[in-house]
Amino acid sequence: MQATRVKPTGAQRTFSLDEILVTKTNSDDVIVYANDAFIDVSGYTEAEIIGATHEIVRHPDMPRGLSKHLTAMLKDGQEMFVYIPQLTKDGTTYWVLAHVTPSRDSAGRVVGEHSHDRAPDPASIAEASAIYSRLMAEERRHPDPEAAKAASIRMFTEFLADKGMTYEEWVWSITKEWSA
């Protein structure tokens, strides 16, 4: 199932702090499971979600270079935490702090991923959004998509080096506790 490109409306939404949005995908990033919370927040029906790729909720403000880097980490068997802007079916933006783990078969091969997403603190969203905006501006400077991805991940790698942090350390450095 191919996702129809939804355009952001500029509207923002959050979801409850006690909700966890869950998806499971196969090795082709096709969603094979989504819990009711994910379906409710995304605005899609279960029939629209199951069989679609995560592109269905992909926000155009998520840097493709960072997405490519994170996908490589997963295929390499690493789990991660990542801030991700996503889009509902009607174009409303919602952010998640996703804990993404590789799914493995009985031989230990990575055959997909499992994501548990929580509602992030607004201050954490602001910090992630600021660096993502810089990465997106870098991507727009390059007409070739692969060169754009390479340039933005290079910029992000330099950003992390300047801070003396790994990717995971940066994520946790901007993660704030909050309550509604």
Image (tube, rainbow, N blue to C red):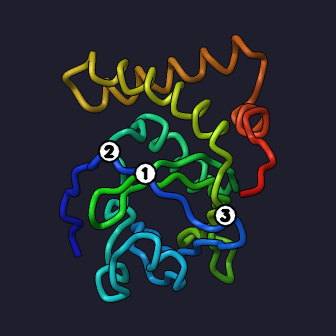
Q: What residue did someone put label 3 on?
A: 101
Q: Quadrant of residue 37?
A: bottom right
Distance CA(mark 2)–CA(mark 3) = 30 Å
Q: What residue did someone put label 1 on?
A: 12
Residue contact between numbered discs 2 and 1, judged by CB atoms under 8 Å: yes
- The three-letter code of the residue at mark 3 reads Thr
Residue in view at x 36 percent, y 49 percent: 59
The mark found on residue 178 in the picture is none
Q: What residue did someone put label 2 on?
A: 10
Give the x, y percent position of residue 160: 67, 21
Give the x, y percent position of residue 20: 65, 72
Examine the rendered structure and indicate whether residue 121 appears above or below residue 98. Answer: above
Horizontally, residue 7 falls left or right of residue 175, namely left
Near-viewer residue (79 or 119): 119
Examine the rendered structure and indicate whether residue 151 appears above or below residue 129. Answer: above
**Image quarter hosting the C terminus:** bottom right
